[in-house]
Image (spheres, helix red, strand yellow):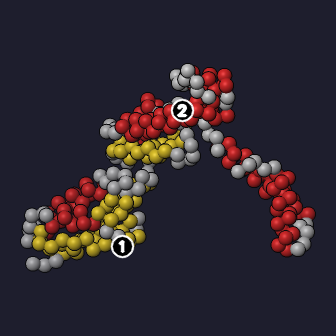
Amino acid sequence: MATRTSQEIFSQIKKSFKDKTKEDSGAVLDLYSMSLSEVLENVYEELEKNKTPHVWTALEGQKLDDTGTWVNLPRNPQENDTAYKYRLLNWMLVNEASNEHAITVKLLNPTHAANIEFVPMTHGCGTGTCYVIPRKYTEEVIAKSLEEARQKMTQIASPGLYVDYLVPELRSVSFEIYLETKGDINTMKENLTNQIRAYVNAIPPKQYLSVGHINKLGVNTSQVDFFSVMSIVINGTQVNKTKLLQEVESKFIFDSINWLEGRQ
């Protein structure tokens, strides 16, 4: 896609308008079209820049050699500019992939956060976002979790990487559950509530909240004769799914259970 000037774009808009309406555009439309053309000219320029995103793709000869030396990858005995650029590009892609893997490893097993997930290219090339789930949603723990993520990223990420740090939005999860038991109903409900709360709050990003798993928790509990999740409500809205994805940008948090009690 070649760069186009605002005048070229403006002329095409006027021609297209006349072809479709068989009339000339007026002064007001011309002013609007010229403003639009100037914006589009900038868009074309950015697109053209992004076709060659790496600094050495526009370099030749000694300047290309200097760049390769700077990254400790000098030109080989009979290597022309094209072959050298190709080797530099491959090196950079491998290096970026290695860095992303290194970031993932570095963010494992945090102290203050329950989970830190890095998502690359959230705002384009050279950017990313760390979604930080604190162990507790208190002001102190959130602050410590965010600082922990920043320190880990500073130690491992490439210097030019721009990173946002966000705490995922909470999504409250409530259930309606039918229960029959021969045991003490109140003790049973308390025990099952604690198990379900622990399960929901511990679901990591990119994993699922599973109705089947919750039903297994219930039916495998001693003295439970019948157990079934009847409905799930997320942020006040009932959902009709048996598996719900724990997205990176949000966090399931247990809210409550409405128990429907059967009789034995």
Q: Does 175 sit above or below residue 46?
A: below
Q: State the mark number for residue 87.
A: 2
**Amino acid type indicated by mark 2:** Arg
**Quarter location, residue 63:** top right
Relative height, residue 211 to residue 95 (above, below): below
Task: List the residue tagged with mark 1.
Answer: 240
Q: Position of residue 220 (x, y in %)?
A: 13, 64
Q: Nearer the viewer, mark 2 or mark 1?
A: 2
Q: Residue at x 35, y 63 (%)?
A: 244
Compared across the picture, whether 120 is left or right of 33 comes to: left
Q: Earlier in the sequence, mark 2 or mark 1?
A: 2
Tag 1, which secondary structure?
Answer: loop
> Which residue shows up at 33% across the image and 59% down it?
208
Given the current orientation, which residue lies at the most extreme front position?
78
- The location of residue 107, given as percent across then percent down, is 37, 38
From the top left corner, tell me how far across and down residue 114 is, in percent: 33, 44
Question: Around disc 1, counting alpha carbons within 10 Å, would you say few (fewer than 14), some (14 to 19), or many (20 or more)?
Answer: few
Instruction: Pick whichever, 252 or 257, lies toward us.
Output: 252
Other-residue count near label 2 (Cα within 10 Å), few / some / many at <14 / 14–19 / ≥20:
some
Q: In this orientation, which residue lies closer to the viewer: 210 or 7?
A: 7
Q: Is residue 160 visible?
A: no
> What is the three-letter code of the residue carrying label 1?
Asn
